[in-house]
Amino acid sequence: MSRRVLIVIAALALAAALVFAARPHEATADERIDQIATELRCPVCQGLSVKDSTSETARQMRDLVAQRVREGRTNAEIEAEFRAAYGDWILLSPPVASWSGLVWLVPVAALAAGLVFVTGRLRGTEGPPPAQPSAIDVAALRDRVAREEAAEG
Amino acid sequence: MLARVARIAVVVALLGLTVTLALAFRRDPHDIKTGTVLKAAPTFTLQRLDGSGEVSLADLSGKVVVMNFFASWCLPCTQENPALVRVYERYRGSDVVLLGVNLQESRENGLAYVKRMGMSWATLADDDGRVALSYGVFGPPETFFIGPDGVIAGRHIGPIDEDTLVTAIETLRARAVR
């Protein structure tokens, strides 16, 4: 077998291994519990997720999440249960399609308004375009040039 | 043209901010309307702290229910307790039911506190915190007012006083009569 064929086989094997490793796999129950607990806010903490908090409330929330996962509920259903009790506040990243989604929209809108404002101001400082000379001015200038040329000649 | 639009946008944004701040500062921080308020109260059946049976919310349909979440380690709970005792005595035997829900501690500690503080109303054990979570409780003390229709009419976060309790109860009783 030639050396070139061996290299091709090795490259194909490597590509197959990478594709196999990167294939989408179904999250395990523990991974789902961690994922949901990361997205939920601990109600008795300052900006901590349920996953990161060691408080009793966070522990009880994790237990509830684990039970709901075992019961076969989807992530969205489990989060909806907490949102029903605490509102969208319980999610560390507020959903875009709700009133709390304004926290995402307002900065973008403010930035756009700021750009429009600055652009408008910059254009305003350029000043008006120079006025075109009238036919009388042009005629007077031509007269003056002719006079000066005659005087020099 | 663009500058005019931007100027209007800035004015609208400032106006919006002013209105939002004005509304936020007017609101009572103890009176939180989000979550379960104005929705059907989550049903539950909990054991009494003293082990003498269970209490189910479904059995209290048609009554005004005042649900107070407490714990022995919670200092504000101790502070609000005299008001709860007076209100319980005032409405004893009426259509108003006061329930204490003990959370995040052992039953022994909860029961010792109940006896020490003279709490004669039904006190229940929320051992796994599921009832507190279903009501959206942040931490004790918190008080929920459930109308005869089974809907949570209001909640109070933090220690509550007698006037607030009586006003909320009377509002619900008046609504039930109408």
Image (cartoon, coloured by chain):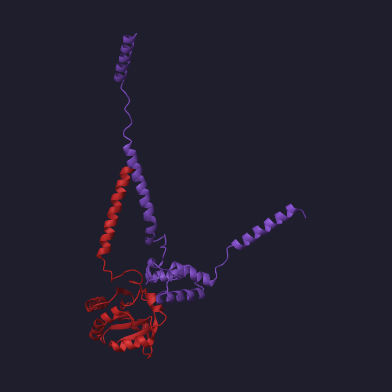
Q: Quadrant of residue B154?
A: bottom left
A22 displayed left or right of A73: right
- In this view, A129 is above or below A38: above
Residue plotted at (29% across, 59% down): B20
Residue plotted at (65% across, 59% down): A16
Q: Position of residue B91 (x, y in %)?
A: 24, 84
Q: Nearer the viewer, residue B157 or B105?
A: B105
Hey, which residue is sitting farthest bottom in the picture? Answer: B52
Chain A tint as drawn: purple
Residue plotted at (21% across, 77% down): B163
Residue plotted at (43% across, 76% down): A59
Q: Quadrant of residue B33?
A: bottom left
Q: Nearer the viewer, residue B11 or A77?
A: B11
Q: Quadrant of the N terminus of chain A?
A: bottom right
B86 displayed left or right of A85: left
- In this view, B116 is above or below B17: below
- Residue B162 appears in the picture as rendered: yes
Q: Position of residue B67 (x, y in %)?
A: 32, 80
Hey, which residue is sitting farthest left in the picture? Answer: B163
In red, which chain?
B
- Residue B1 appears in the picture as rendered: no
Q: Quadrant of the C terminus of chain A?
A: top left
Q: How many marks?
A: 0
- In this view, B116 is above or below B69: below
Q: Position of residue A148 (x, y in %)?
A: 31, 12
Q: Position of residue B29 (x, y in %)?
A: 28, 69
Hey, which residue is sitting farthest top in the picture? Answer: A153
